[in-house]
Image (cartoon, helix red, strand yellow):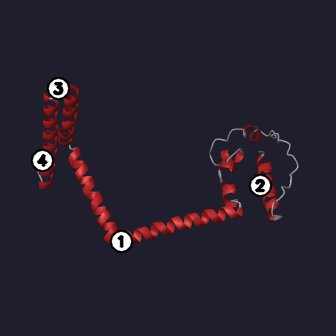
């Protein structure tokens, strides 16, 4: 057994002994319910040691301390932090550019395009509501109301164009 294992065993034994002393004092004071509670609490460190969980917790703690030390003082860890920061920046940049373009690439390859024959060609089950299209029957499109141009408070004409684009996309999807 290693020195660390002996220390772990000694700490668990000391905690169990302390809990049993508190249980005896509570029993002498006439509070048997509290004494029983202290016995239960006192047996936890002994059980953790005997099952090996105390040693496991010590090893996890040592590994976490080693990792934190490497993170603070290691150049390799700082290079990893820089790589992760660059990756997150790239993903956020792509998301921002994609949302400005309206997500044309994602729209063409996203889950919405996997309905009907496109889904069965890829080996996927067709989405709900697409059975009519795959059987050759046209799907009834809801009648769309003419687009209303919203009034802008500041007089921006670009705001109405954006809403018109959104309404057109919703109309194409049948929403």
Q: How crowded is mark 1: few (under 14 residues within 10 Å), some or many (20 or more)?
A: few
Q: Of the two numbered discs 4 and 2 on the same chain, state the one appearing first in sequence.
A: 4
x%, y% of residue 147?
A: 86, 52
Kindly report the distance in space between the C-alpha atoms of the residues bearing marks 3 and 4: 30 Å
Quarter-of-image position of residue 52: top left
Which is more toward the observer, 82 or 104? 82
Q: Mark 3 points at which residue?
A: 30
Report the side of 118 relative to 86 (left or right).
Answer: right
Q: Residue furthest bottom?
A: 75
Judged from the image, the secondary structure of the residue bearing numbered disc 4 is helix
Q: Of the two numbered discs 3 and 4 on the same chain, state the one appearing first in sequence.
A: 4
Which is more toward the observer, 108 or 48? 48
* Badge nearest the viewer, 4 or 2: 4
Instruction: Determine contact: label 1, label 2, CB under 8 Å.
Output: no
Kindly report the distance in space between the C-alpha atoms of the residues bearing marks 1 and 2: 47 Å
Quarter-of-image position of residue 89: bottom right
Report the side of 86 relative to 54 (left or right).
Answer: right
Q: Name the residue under label 1.
A: 76
x%, y% of residue 72?
A: 33, 69
Which is more toward the observer, 125 or 170? 170
Q: Mark 2 points at which residue?
A: 166
Taking 31 as reference, is 52 above or below it? below
The quarter of the image holding the C terminus is: top right
Kindly report the distance in space between the C-alpha atoms of the residues bearing marks 4 and 2: 69 Å
Q: Of the two numbered discs 1 and 2 on the same chain, state the one appearing first in sequence.
A: 1
Instruction: Determine contact: label 4, label 1, CB under 8 Å.
Output: no
Q: Of the two numbered discs 4 and 1 on the same chain, state the one appearing first in sequence.
A: 4
Q: Of the two numbered discs 2 and 3 on the same chain, state the one appearing first in sequence.
A: 3
Q: Which mark is residue 10?
A: 4
């Amino acid at each position: 057994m290693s020195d660390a294992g002996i220390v772990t065993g000694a700490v668990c034994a000391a905690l169990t002994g302390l809990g049993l002393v508190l249980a005896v004092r509570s029993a002498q004071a006439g509070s048997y319910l509290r004494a029983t509670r202290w016995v239960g609490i006192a047996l936890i460190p002994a059980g953790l040691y005997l099952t090996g969980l105390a040693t496991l917790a010590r090893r996890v703690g040592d590994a976490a301390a080693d990792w934190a030390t490497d993170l603070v003082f290691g150049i390799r860890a700082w290079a990893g932090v820089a790589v992760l920061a660059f990756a997150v920046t790239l993903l956020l940049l792509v998301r921002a550019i994609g949302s400005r373009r309206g997500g044309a690439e994602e729209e063409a390859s996203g889950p919405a395009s996997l309905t009907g024959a496109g889904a069965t060609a890829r080996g996927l089950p067709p989405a709900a509501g697409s059975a009519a299209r795959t059987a050759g029957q046209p799907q009834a499109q809801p009648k769309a109301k003419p687009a209303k141009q919203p009034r802008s408070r500041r007089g921006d004409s670009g705001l109405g164009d954006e809403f018109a684009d959104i309404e057109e996309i919703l109309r194409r999807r049948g929403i």
